[in-house]
């Protein structure tokens, strides 16, 4: 990773990193039937694990209100992890495990200050919103869609909080697609 | 990430337009709501929100920039749902009855923001229920994008109220 961090570099780097540690990871071999949604949920679970690790990394650069919200959001992401694990197990699947802190640290962009940490957080939340919205049409069961929708609303709210912490409006767009 | 492309603005506005018209079953008492019925209810919520922010703008019951932004976003949501209904063969109904609680809320900025926050919270729950119930999967991503927007509106209103942004 380059030593200096431009905005474009940070976002591009974050996208690459998250793609590699998130939903493009192969889903573990599990027992559920194809199309049950377990594999898809496992891909999102890997992204949630990465988000938890990223907030832990970014916390070291944040202060005051930003730090408090980063911790609160990380706590909610951990709740999402637990909920996804429960759903995947309910489908007969084996849950994706988080990587080690060292593996995440090596794969995340180098962050130098709170601004960089918040840009990385924004990129994370955008990707999480997108992952849940893209999952909706593929989940075969109403209750799985309900869970994905509830978590997508949480991620939309997280994104709004990050927007505010970065000095912008909470809700800059009428359609929150998770596309930067 | 999956290979599904992010929805385009046009796609969002059409909300899955181009689908063959839904065959509306006879309204048996226990039958679940049709997709068109669900869309119609969501539209009514969007119009109620739009009317609320419009009233707040006229009465100065919310910061002007915030009221304007939220009104315009609700209007875009409503427009997208109207187009989607039209593409499925149903004309959007007329404006809903004014909410009696709106007038009372306009007496102070805090009262209005709390009223609007309540509307937004109920809209979020309505979209979650809709996303669990809709049969036409082409509607799910664009309506999900509106769901996330309403969740952001709640944050914007909490900020206006000086409350914790993520609520309790």
Image (spheres, grey):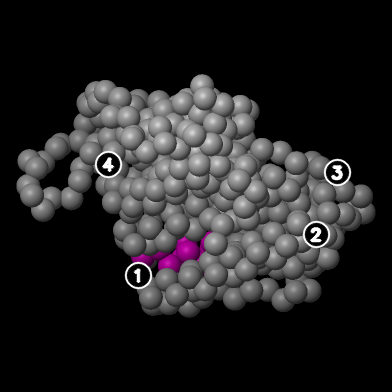
Q: Would you place residue A103 above or below residue A168 in this image? A: below
Q: Are marks 4 and 2 on the same chain?
A: no
Mark 4 or mark 1: which is in front? 4
CA gap between label 4 and label 3 equals: 45 Å
Task: Give the residue pinned by disc 1.
Answer: A33
Task: Give the residue pinned by disc 3.
Answer: A6
Q: Are marks 1 and 3 on the same chain?
A: yes
Query: Which one is earlier in the sequence, the residue at label 2 or at label 1?
Result: 1
Task: Give the residue pinned by disc 2.
Answer: A64
Return the mark for residue B38: 4
How far across and down, in percent of the image, does residue A101 sit?
Answer: 75, 74
CA gap between label 4 and label 1 equals: 31 Å
Mark 4 or mark 3: which is in front? 4
Q: Residue at x 47, y 61 (%)?
A: A40
What subunit carries mark 2? A
Q: Would you place residue A142 above or below residue A29 in this image? A: above
Q: Residues within 10 Å of mark 4 (few under 14, many from 20)?
A: some
Horizontal relation, residue B8 to residue A77: left or right: left
How far across and down, in percent of the image, does residue B166 sit?
Answer: 59, 56
Q: Residues within 10 Å of mark 3 (few under 14, many from 20)?
A: few
């Amino acid at each position: 990773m380059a030593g200096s961090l431009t905005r474009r570099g940070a976002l591009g780097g974050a996208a690459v990193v998250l793609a590699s540690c998130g939903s493009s990871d192969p889903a573990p071999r599990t027992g559920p039937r194809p199309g049950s949604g377990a594999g898809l949920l496992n891909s999102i679970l890997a992204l949630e694990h990465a988000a938890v690790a990223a907030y832990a990394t970014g916390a070291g650069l944040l202060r005051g209100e930003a730090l408090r919200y980063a911790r609160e959001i990380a706590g909610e992401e951990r709740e999402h992890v637990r909920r996804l694990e429960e759903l995947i197990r309910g489908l007969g699947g084996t849950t994706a495990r988080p990587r080690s802190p060292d593996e995440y640290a090596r794969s995340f962009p180098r962050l130098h200050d709170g601004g960089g940490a918040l840009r990385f957080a924004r990129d994370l939340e955008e990707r999480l919103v997108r992952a849940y919205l893209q999952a909706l049409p593929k989940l075969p069961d109403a209750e799985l869609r309900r869970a994905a929708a509830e978590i997508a609303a949480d991620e939309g709210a997280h994104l709004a909080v990050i927007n505010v912490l970065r000095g912008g409006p909470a809700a800059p767009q009428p359609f929150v697609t998770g596309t930067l | 990430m999956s290979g599904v492309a992010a929805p385009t603005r046009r796609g969002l506005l059409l909300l899955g337009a181009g689908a063959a018209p839904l065959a509306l079953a006879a309204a048996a008492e226990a039958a679940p709501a049709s997709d068109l019925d669900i869309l119609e209810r969501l539209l009514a919520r969007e119009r109620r929100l739009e009317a609320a922010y419009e009233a707040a703008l006229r009465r100065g019951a919310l910061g002007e920039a915030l009221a304007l932004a939220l009104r315009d976003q609700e209007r875009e949501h409503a427009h997208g749902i109207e187009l989607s209904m039209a593409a499925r063969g149903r004309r959007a109904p007329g404006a809903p009855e004014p909410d009696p609680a709106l007038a009372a809320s306009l007496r102070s900025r805090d009262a209005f923001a709390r009223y609007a926050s309540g509307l937004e919270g109920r809209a979020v729950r309505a979209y979650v229920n809709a996303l669990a119930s809709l049969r036409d999967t082409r509607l799910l991503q664009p309506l999900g994008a509106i769901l996330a927007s309403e969740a952001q509106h709640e944050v914007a209103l909490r900020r206006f109220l000086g409350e914790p942004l993520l609520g309790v």
